[in-house]
Amino acid sequence: MKDPWGYEELVVHAPGPNFLTVFLFGSMFKPGMMQGTAKSFAKIIFWIENFFYISHMFLQHLVLMVFCYFKLTMNIAEAAHKCQKLGVIVWIIFGPFYLIAAVF
């Protein structure tokens, strides 16, 4: 969007659902001031939103990692015969490190 006055932020981040647009209202009636305020506002909103998205994704991966560890441990234990119990022991020791590396 190419808005020479900077009012696109009031359209993209509508005042109803986004309470942070109250910071734009002070510069809304001064076109020169609105451009700088809109650029700063867009950067701040971008990082605030992405912080919560990235945090949520990271926590979700950590929770799923625990379930994957136990599920894979059960699968390895079921597949291993008496002479192959070494695979279960190796997974129990090194499995968490493998799954943490998979998250990153």
Image (cartoon, rainbow, N blue to C red):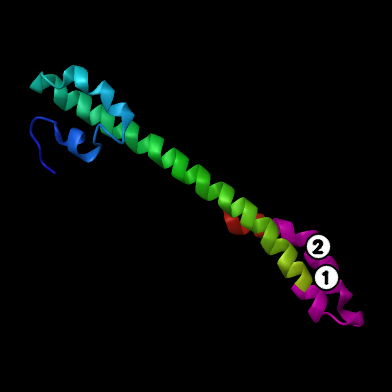
- Quarter-of-image position of residue 83: bottom right
Mark 1 → mark 2, Cα distance in angstroms? 6 Å
Mark 1, Cα crowd under 10 Å, few <14 / some 14-19 / many 20+, is many
Q: How many numbered marks have been drawn onto this rendered protein structure?
A: 2
In the image, is 9 to the left or to the right of 19?
Answer: left
Mark 2, Cα crowd under 10 Å, few <14 / some 14-19 / many 20+, is some
Q: Nearer the viewer, residue 64 or 102?
A: 64
Query: Disc 1, disc 2: CB below 8 Å?
Result: yes
Q: Please give the name of the residue rendered at 27% of the width and 28% of the height, measured from the top-left corner.
A: 21
The N terminus: image quadrant: top left
In the image, is 23 to the left or to the right of 58?
Answer: left
Give the extent of the magenta segment. 75-97
Q: Which residue is mark 1?
A: 88
Q: Which residue is mark 2?
A: 92
Q: Nearer the viewer, residue 84 or 31?
A: 31
Q: Position of residue 80 (x, y in %)?
A: 83, 79
Q: Could you say whether the residue bearing mark 2 is in a helix, strand or loop?
A: helix
In the image, is 96 to the left or to the right of 34?
Answer: right
Q: Amino acid at mark 2?
A: Ile
